[in-house]
Image (cartoon, grey):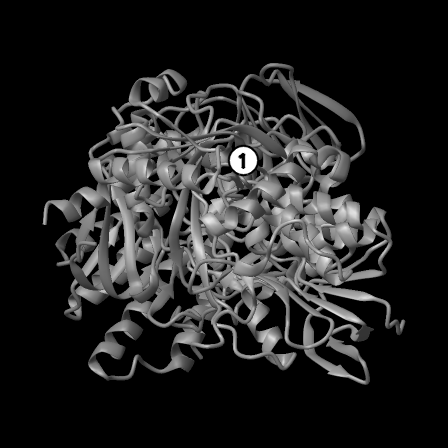
């Protein structure tokens, strides 16, 4: 096959971690290529930041945190790093060949080092009715606001977590009406939360921001805390949401648009498909690639940065991107990459709020696996909890054998939506610890690649 | 721990091992099957599922035909799992002159050997049977009644049928040592010691290692991981399993509408990690051929590629027969085409274990056929 172009560093993802790493690495003299699947840099956090800068109204409602990304985007634009947008990376091969598809054609580049900065994705939320038209994730609702300046008026928000409150706040700032906010976080803080809030004081800005968002949401919307047994009502599309409030009262609120959220987890499909070692994080209830502080994974020359290492937020993502770039630069120049203790302290300060947030916003069990047997678990193959449980009861050895028994995780999302639920269901049934049950084995291509796109790799050979 | 000299131990829970366990158990033998992972974990669970007599090596045809008899009456053997077999027709078309010559020569040599199951069709007949074909052909070879199956379900079917007839299936049990001692086989495993009068080696890519432990001469077995890709669902356009003469493509459309594309393209098998690698770009040539045959397939997204570890012999023929040690029978080395043979091989292995004459000659598959070379 044709030998693709070579770069000292190929970064996958142009979010905070990828951009920061690209700035640092290219300043240090590394030829750096960033492959990103979006039309413009910014990732999810700073989506469309360059375009929105010209929009006066967007300035008003997206908030200061969003605009802080402008500095990063500017520095990246001034750097020597090369960006290729709308590239879907579908496999990292042996010897750091990076395969991707751009504009209908499969291609390859070779890399001295690869940095995976593919960030986070929202946790799947298999509650009753979650697949009905009219139900969207809060992340998708926010993407709508960032990329087209539009949102749904009169929506109900249900769930919890930092992105949840931020997005409600942004909707309110943008002048959209929010019918109700149904908060699933505990209505009162426990002793444990106060204890964990102590280190969070190292990031007072974040704490205060959260308090401010919540205060404003309480003031401007119908706000219900401590909600349990949340389910979407409707036959062919969502017509409302039902739940029990903190006092146990049953409530139903009519709504056409329902936005749900239970936090984010690292998007591990690429790191899993690249066969990096992963470990189960009991606090965040998800898998993290095993790395050192510089993001070096278990595979030589492959690094991870940003929320893909473990959820820590945009500020920590920038730091982790810089750290990975320093390590890669040092490796190339035979220098030291800095004092680990110093970086460790800096990183500790950057992530000090996480234990508090992770504990306060732990997804309730009923949002991790459905309470009701008829609720869909695997969207692609339309499998309910009962279907999956029937297969598990046949005595499967784990999620990989389960694929054969009931096709859970065999659809186009490659288990992105169901793997954590399936793992949890197996855990519930067998009692085997979640870390031992393991994740679905992710097979490339991790992004859909058409047969024709791949066939084009042969054309390239013929033209040589 | 049960000690039993009348016992037969089968090592390997793939299709050969499970079918052998079924035929032995059905004949009243005391069978224990040992599998290091789980039933159908490797090549037998993840292969392309082609049930194919077409294109087989001449010396393999009697075994393939005998096996097909069992496929045809599968339901009485393995019950509900039999619905995983979808008979259709299997066709290999010629796209160039070389392919056409290959096909015509093949038909000629088959006729001379007295076989009638493959026949030659011209382009018009092929296009009548495959109206969605996007290219002209130079004719092709067809076999009626071949087809495809969901491989892991067939293997599960044999395993379950064996268990119904009293066989014990032990999964997650790795053989650590195999030796002949005190007139019977001592099989030391991760779950303890087993003794048996006879041992059947159906360990696939791991079989040569077992043979070596058993004190057999070195077997020239190599391991590779053939790759496959599956697409999203599409409208039904392909009612057959297809190949191209002179190429290794295998193409089929499942009842879900998904295309399975692959065949012949191998990745590296990581025996230590117990997993096959996947190198998608190597599949590009197969994709190219698939889109030549059906332009519609070009727009179908590939949703998953996978591979499975399999054992290969230098002549691409399996090893089926008695070993040089008493009570040792081998059935491995199927070189990427063992799935259809499975039921027939299981029956033949059962015959060997019971000291009976298999209904077809196993001479071409003699375990010692490479010994002069080594």
Q: Position of residue A160 (x, y in %)?
A: 59, 41
Give the chain letter at badge 1. Answer: B
**Above or below, B360 relative to B133:** below
Q: Residue furthest left?
A: A464
**Above or below, A100 relative to B3:** above
Q: Position of residue B106 (x, y in %)?
A: 36, 40
**Numbered circles on residues, count:** 1
Please state if A325 lies on the left or on the right of B269 as rendered. left
Q: Residue at x 44, y 58 (%)?
A: B316
Q: Residue at x 40, y 68 (%)?
A: A295
Indicate the quadrant containing the C terminus of chain B: top left, top right, bottom left or bottom right: bottom left
Q: Is residue B145 visible?
A: yes
Q: Which residue is mark 1?
A: B148
Residue A259: quarter of image: top right
Indicate the quadrant containing the N terminus of chain B: top left, top right, bottom left or bottom right: bottom right
Please state if A244 lies on the left or on the right of A13 as rendered. right
Please state if B87 lies on the left or on the right of B138 as rendered. right
Q: Residue at x 64, y 15 (%)?
A: A235
Q: Secondary structure at mark 1?
A: strand
Looking at this view, is A273 or A132 the one in front?
A: A273
Q: Position of residue B353 (x, y in %)?
A: 74, 62
Q: Position of residue B218 (x, y in %)?
A: 52, 78
Looking at this view, is A237 or B256 the one in front?
A: B256
Q: Is residue A211 visible?
A: no
**Above or below, A23 relative to A459:** below
């Amino acid at each position: 096959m044709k030998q693709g172009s070579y770069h000292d560093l190929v970064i996958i993802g142009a979010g905070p971690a990828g951009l920061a790493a690209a700035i640092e690495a290219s300043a240090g003299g590394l030829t750096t290529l960033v492959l990103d699947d979006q039309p413009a840099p910014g990732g999810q956090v700073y989506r469309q930041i360059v375009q929105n800068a010209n929009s006066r109204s967007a300035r008003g409602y997206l908030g200061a945190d969003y605009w802080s990304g402008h500095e990063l985007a500017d520095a990246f634009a001034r750097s020597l790093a090369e960006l290729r947008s709308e590239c879907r990376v579908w496999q990292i091969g042996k010897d750091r060949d990076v395969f991707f598809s751009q504009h209908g054609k499969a291609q390859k580049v070779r890399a001295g080092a690869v940095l995976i900065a593919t960030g986070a994705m929202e946790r799947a939320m298999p509650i009753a009715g979650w697949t009905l038209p009219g139900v969207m994730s809060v992340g998708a609702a926010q993407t709508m606001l960032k990329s087209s300046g539009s949102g749904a008026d009169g929506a109900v928000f249900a769930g919890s977590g930092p992105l949840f409150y931020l997005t409600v706040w942004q909707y309110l700032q943008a002048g959209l009406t929010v019918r109700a906010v149904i908060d699933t976080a505990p209505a009162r803080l426990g002793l444990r939360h106060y204890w964990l809030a102590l280190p969070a004081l190292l990031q007072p800005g974040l704490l205060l921001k959260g308090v401010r968002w919540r205060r404003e949401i309480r003031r401007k919307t119908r706000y219900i805390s401590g909600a349990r047994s949340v389910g979407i009502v409707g036959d062919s599309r969502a017509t409302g949401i039902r739940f029990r409030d903190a006092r146990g009262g049953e409530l139903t609120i009519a709504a056409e648009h329902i936005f749900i959220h239970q936090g984010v987890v690292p998007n591990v499909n690429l790191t899993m498909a690249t066969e990096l070692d992963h470990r189960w994080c009991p606090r965040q209830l998800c898998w993290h690639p095993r790395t050192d502080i510089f993001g070096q994974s278990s595979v030589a020359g492959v690094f991870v940065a940003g929320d893909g290492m473990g959820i820590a937020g945009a500020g920590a993502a920038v730091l982790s991107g810089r750290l990975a770039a320093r390590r890669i630069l040092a490796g190339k120049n035979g220098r030291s990459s800095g004092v680990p203790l110093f970086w460790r302290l800096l990183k500790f300060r950057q992530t000090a709020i996480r234990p508090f947030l992770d504990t306060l916003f732990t997804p309730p069990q009923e949002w991790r696996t459905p309470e009701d047997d008829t609720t869909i678990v695997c969207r692609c193959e339309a499998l309910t909890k009962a279907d999956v449980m029937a297969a598990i009861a046949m005595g499967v050895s784990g999620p990989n054998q389960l694929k054969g028994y009931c096709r859970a995780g065999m659809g186009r999302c490659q288990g992105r939506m169901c793997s954590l639920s399936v793992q949890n269901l197996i855990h519930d049934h067998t009692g085997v610890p979640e870390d031992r049950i393991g994740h679905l084995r992710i097979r490339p291509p991790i992004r859909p690649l058409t047969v024709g796109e791949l066939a084009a790799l042969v054309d390239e050979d013929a033209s040589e | 721990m049960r000690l039993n000299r009348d016992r037969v131990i089968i090592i390997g829970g793939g299709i050969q091992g499970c079918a052998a366990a079924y035929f032995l158990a059905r004949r009243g033998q005391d069978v224990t099957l040992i599998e290091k992972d789980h039933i159908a974990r490797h090549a037998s669970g993840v292969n392309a599922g082609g049930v194919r007599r077409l294109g087989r090596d001449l010396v393999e045809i009697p075994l393939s035909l005998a096996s097909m008899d069992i496929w045809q009456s599968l339901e009485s053997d393995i019950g509900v799992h039999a619905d995983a077999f979808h008979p259709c027709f299997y066709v290999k078309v010629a796209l160039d002159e070389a392919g056409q010559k290959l096909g015509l020569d093949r038909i000629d040599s088959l006729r001379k050997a007295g076989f009638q199951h493959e026949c030659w069709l011209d382009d018009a007949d092929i296009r009548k049977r495959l109206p969605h074909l996007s290219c002209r052909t130079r004719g092709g070879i067809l076999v009626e009644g071949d087809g495809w199956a969901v491989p892991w379900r067939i293997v599960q079917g044999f395993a379950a049928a064996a268990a119904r007839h009293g066989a014990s299936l032990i999964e997650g049990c790795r053989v650590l040592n195999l030796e002949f001692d005190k007139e019977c086989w001592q099989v030391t495993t991760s779950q303890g010691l087993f003794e048996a009068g006879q041992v059947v080696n159906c360990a696939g890519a791991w079989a040569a290692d077992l043979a070596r432990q058993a004190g057999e001469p070195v077997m020239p077995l190599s391991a590779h991981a053939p790759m496959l890709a599956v697409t999203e669902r599409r409208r039904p356009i392909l009612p057959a399993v297809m190949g191209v003469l002179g190429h290794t493509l295998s193409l089929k459309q499942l009842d879900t509408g998904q295309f399975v594309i692959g065949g012949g393209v191998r990745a590296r098998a990581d025996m230590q990690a117990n997993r096959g690698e996947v190198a998608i770009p190597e599949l590009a040539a197969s994709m190219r051929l698939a889109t030549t045959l059906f332009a519609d397939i070009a727009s179908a997204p590939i949703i998953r590629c996978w591979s499975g570890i399999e054992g290969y012999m230098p002549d691409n023929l399996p090893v089926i027969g008695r070993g040089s040690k008493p009570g040792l029978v081998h059935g491995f080395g199927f070189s990427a085409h063992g799935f259809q043979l499975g039921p027939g091989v299981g029956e033949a292995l059962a015959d060997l274990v019971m000291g009976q004459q298999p209904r077809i000659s196993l001479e071409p598959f003699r375990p010692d056929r490479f010994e002069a070379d080594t």
